Image: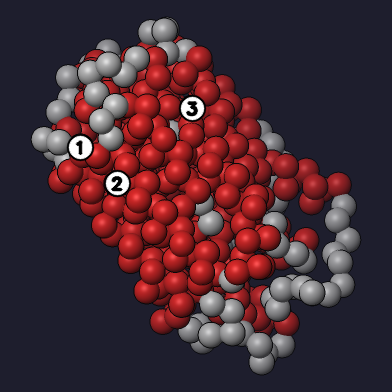
Amino acid sequence: MTSPHFSDTPATIGPELRRARLAVAAAFATQGMVFINLTTRLPDFTDKWDLSDNELTLLLLMMVLLAGAGSVLAETLARTRDSATLLRTGLALITLAVPVMSLAPEFGFFAASMAVYGVALGMVDATTNMQGVALEHRYGRPILPSFHGAWTVGGLLGAGVTLATSHLAIGAGAVLAVVPLIVLTRPFLRRVGDPAADAPKLEIPWRPILLVGLGMVLFYMVDTAAFTWGPLYLEHVFDDTPSGLFALAVVPYLISSGGMRLAGDNLVGRYGEVVILRIGGVVAALALAIVVFAPTWPVAVLGFLILGSGVGVIAPLSFSAAARIAGGVDEDPVTRQARVDAVIARFNQFNYLGALLGSVLTGAVGNNDLRIGFAVPMVLILGILPLARAFARGR
């Protein structure tokens, strides 16, 4: 049985599309690798520049706001320019920002490189999803989940690099710039703009899509809190955490969330979206309670491991539900596909509000005690319980 917004007739997949798919997957993986590598190195950056939690929170606020601006800029430019060119521009900015961030001789250079990285983050976020939506349309079947899986694999590689190089000077991270430099030369899909801007004026059911989007916000709130503040939590809260193991807050979380996504199709097929999301919300709240009240750092790491299994399926189920709601059931296939493309191209915007809650609110509330900071997502993730009904098929 095929999805309602994809054709029953398999598309002819030529070598050009296969190469483009590999290139876009590499861009997603690069985005995940660099982002996770930088966030797991935050304890080193805070030590180098003697940053307080408030100062780091302000830097993260700047980066998230500029990421949103970079995403809007990319979408605006994509109305008249090729998204492949804009994606290469974002990757080039990451190539420039990473070594400056790692080798900055003065704090001003470090802050400026974070600003550049923020803009690049938003540009790559927007354009990889534009490319992914276009490729999914040409393949005629869902492939966006595999791209987000590539992001997770890249994140694991980034955390692995942090663990493997923890004994080296912080400047060693500059070599990571080689990866986006290589990926920007790959053959992305050409002549693709912004699907939302390119689509005809369509009536889109935004209210139910907004409810699903709020679920996405809750996921990114937890996700960003774990990535951004997890390593610092192990450093600040526990005196005996080995300095080379701060990234262990992120690695177990990524592994368990990735594993849950692999098992998610069968679980959702057997029990349905509503049950899985509600159980996941309770598990996530309990996992964050383990983190908040952990007496030792290994117990906190266990909490992050359980957390990934609780929230791992929220993002893919959000994209799937948004596409299903946008597609409808009573229109011709071309119109359905145009609406789905327009919605999915915009849907990733919900991550910025979640990122603000996860990185900025967690840090601001937990300025004096990160245990209190992590209590914020512990409580708010329970919002997925009433929202879960919006994900149900047939609504």
Marks 2 and 1, the one that precedes in the sequence:
2
Location of mark 2 (residue):
289
394 relative to 52, above or below: below
How many labels sit on residues? Answer: 3
Q: Is residue 118 visible?
A: no
* Corner quadrant of residue 199: bottom right
241 relative to 323, above or below: above
Question: Which amino acid type is shown beneath numbered disc 2?
Answer: Ala
Residue 137: x percent and y percent? 71, 65
Q: Is residue 296 visible?
A: yes
Residue 80: x percent and y percent? 54, 61
Question: Which amino acid type is shown beneath numbered disc 3?
Answer: Ala
Location of mark 3 (residue):
159
Residue drawn at point x = 46 percent, y = 62 percent: 279
Secondary structure beneath dot 1 equals helix
Marks 3 and 2, the one that precedes in the sequence:
3
Q: Label 1 near label 2: C-beta < 8 Å? A: no
Q: Nearer the viewer, mark 2 or mark 1?
A: 2
Question: Which amino acid type is shown beneath numbered disc 1?
Answer: Leu
Residue 290: x percent and y percent? 32, 42
